[in-house]
Amino acid sequence: MEARITLLPGDGVGPEVVHEAAACLTAVAKAYGHRFHLEEALIGGAAVDATGDPLPAATLARCQASQAVLLGAVGGPAWDRHPRDQRPESGLLRLRRSLGLYANLRPVKVHPALEDASPLRPEVTHGTDLMIVRELGGGLYFGEPRSFSDERAVNTLPYTRTEIEQVARVAFELAASRRRRLVSVDKANVLETSRLWRQIVDELAPSYPTVQVTHAYVDSFAMALITRPRDFDVVLTENLFGDILSDEAAVLAGSLGLLPSASLGGPVGLYEPIHGSAPDIAGRDAANPIGTILSAAMLLRHSLRLETEALALEAAVDRVLKGGHGTSDLGGLKHQHGTRALGERIREAIRPPRAKGA
Ligand code: NAD
Ligand code: IPM
Ligand code: MN
């Protein structure tokens, strides 16, 4: 097949990890006989420096004209004092909103070779395989009114029935195709938005009779997530809770650099690692590219419907980790590599399709 994919490297380690993931996409295309047209565009601080706008109109137009977008990360100390609409992060938020992306899928798996990379004991993390479904288009991130002055600042947490229903349906459907367990995480003992959230999840439940639904409060769930992670399959939650819980879940996997994401809901999907621009290690060939490479695999699966190719890329990552290869954030692995060398190893581990009849 032919596909147009926009690359948004962004800031900090973003360009380093996107370079490796893009090279993996090219390798998959070559092995499986596809043509991917990869085009770069500016976002974040890099775009602010070049144009004054963290999401230039040309970037948005290019994203809208492609089938999928692969993003690295945005942000960094250089732009932290800019007014809100000239901050790198607001470019990313506007991109998510403009593309109509309301469901952010953040899978968390514990690879057997990495059980010692986590500060948590292997008997706790072993076999963890969960999917966080984070609402991405609403909540505190976008709620009005919002304001700032030296004496008082305001943010607002609104959710509409439609916003809750559409993301909840994604979570129910995923649960039905997985281990059929859904936990909806909220703060319904305090927040009206959460009460509505809980009510709507309960209203939808009878339409998904195979799925067993439970509710949890976000504070106690934050503890349960790292004390009994195997108990969870699909985790549905609102925007800010999902942001926080997914970084926490990275501790299960062994490093924040490992976790991918897919943002869905509109005609163009956005794929990005869950980590940020990691200014402390940027430019040192030290960032783990796996979160971005696995995001590229999600892009193959969700936007291009190339399941076999997605599995081939995931299997390549698996093989490399199993062989004890990784970046330095993965602690005790036998073979430590830089970003580029690990990316290359993963590319070389991609197996071509099996011959027919084999
Ligand atoms: P961060 O995720 O950038 O880094 C947190 C820690 O994890 C750092 O110690 C970093 O070195 C490490 N880390 C992150 N990615 C890694 C990787 N691939 N390999 C190895 N180690 C990795 O979070 P932060 O430091 O709080 O934020 C830095 C900047 O990134 C801020 O400007 C923030 O707004 C931005 N940010 C952007 C995104 C995004 O673009 N989606 C996400 C989160 C944070
Ligand atoms: C993420 C990031 C972003 C978010 C920031 C940079 C806007 O933390 O993708 O997890 O909060 O969604
Ligand atoms: Mn985050």
Image: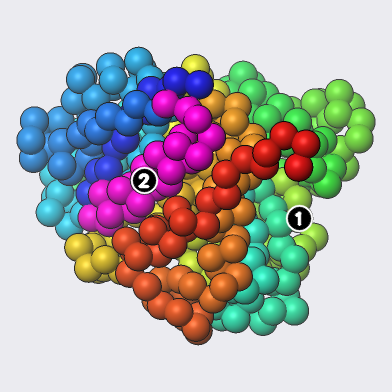
Q: Which residue is mark 2?
A: 23
Residue under the point 35% across and 51% down: 20
Query: In the picture shown, does residue 152 fall above or below 65?
Result: below
User: Viewer-proximal residue, 345 or 90?
Assistant: 345
Q: Is residue 133 left or right of residue 212?
A: left
As helix, strand or loop, the secondary structure at mark 1 comes to loop
N-terminal of the pair, mark 1 or mark 2, is 2
Which is the main secondary structure of the residues drawn in magenta? helix
Amino acid type at circle 2 is Ala
Q: Which residue is mark 1?
A: 232
* C-alpha gap between disc 1 and disc 2: 34 Å
Q: Is residue 212 left or right of residue 4?
A: right
Q: Is residue 211 left or right of residue 236?
A: right
Res 88 label = none
Where is residue 329 shown, x and y percent of the image? 42, 73
Where is residue 356 shown, x and y percent of the image? 72, 34
